[in-house]
Amino acid sequence: MHVFGHISDLQGFLSAQNKIIGFVPTMGALHTGHVSLIKEAKAQSGLVVCSIFVNPTQFNDKKDLERYPRTFEADAALLREAGCDVLFAPSVEEMYPEVDTRKFDFGFLDRTLDGAFRPGHFNGVAQIVSKLFEAVKPHKAFFGQKDYQQVLVVKELVKQLKMQVEIIPCPILRDPDGLAMSSRNVLLTKEEREQAAAIPKLMQEAKAMFNGRNAAEVKKHVENRIASIPLFKPDYFEIRNAEDLSEFDPAKDRQAIALIAVFCGRIRLIDNLLLQ
Ligand code: PAF
């Protein structure tokens, strides 16, 4: 695996390859979910690039940025084992030689759910993803569906910037008890980890209860259940139109999705599940 820290070195290498480039952007603290993205990228491209960069501009909470897990050596070993061809691990100075003042407009997508609860988050994601896409110039980019709203934002970003990259959403990977894999899971205490297992159970309950017309009733049920779990503090549980995250309208929308964001102790966890 080739490792680069500078955009010029990365581009020097990639421009001589003449292969379909599959790209997996990450913030490190890699787990089996990331490995599945690398595997999918390998299956669909001739050369796989993974980036590790903890992007400061997408953290609206300084403490969250400080405690974000950083496990570079273990990450590099995992990527090597997964067959990743290139690791791009730039510094903050490399990606932001000057302050990025760009303000993107994603409309409703940036005002709802995580957009509302984490102001500026998606603008930061758009800043770094556009910079990474410019650096790597991938043909395809692979994103986990756990960050469902992020996938929609990145698709919109690519459309707005007229970038020639295909966005490929990949399924959520889960621990045996159903908890969606996330870099943040390692920060949970034993007790928090045990209670976090309620999240996928609630999502399955919501799916079992949902009949296409009773979104309000399901929402109430799940909110009551969240309130009964001692370490949980909810940001939201919503049932939305899976296409654009607008309010689900049974008369015209094809697919509903349940989305949740909840603090388990100090750690914010998200999950989602298609309902029909
Ligand atoms: O999903 C993530 O890990 C990050 O938001 C991303 C896409 C790597 C941008 O920093």
Image: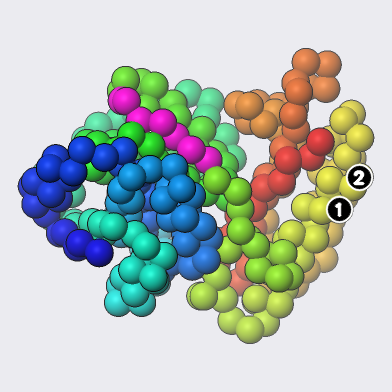
Q: Nearer the viewer, residue 66 or 15?
A: 15
Expressed as whole percent of the image width and height from the top left, the position of residue 196 reads 69, 69
Q: Secondary structure at mark 2?
A: helix
* Whether residue 91 is visible: no
* Figure check: 132 above or below 4: above
Q: Which residue is mark 1?
A: 205
Label 2 crowd (10 A; few <14 / some 14-19 / many >=20):
some
- The magenta region covers 163-169
Disc assigned to residue 209 = 2
Expressed as whole percent of the image width and height from the top left, the position of residue 42 reads 41, 51
* Whether residue 18 is visible: yes
Q: Nearer the viewer, residue 198 or 84?
A: 84
* Figure check: 20 above or below 224: above
Expressed as whole percent of the image width and height from the top left, the position of residue 186 reads 51, 75
Ligand 1 contact, mark 1 (Cβ < 8 Å): no
Residue 167 sits inside the magenta stretch: yes
Expressed as whole percent of the image width and height from the top left, the position of residue 271 reads 64, 53
What amino acid is labelled 2 in the image? Met
Q: Are marks 2 and 1 in contact (CB under 8 Å)?
A: yes
What amino acid is labelled 1 in the image? Glu
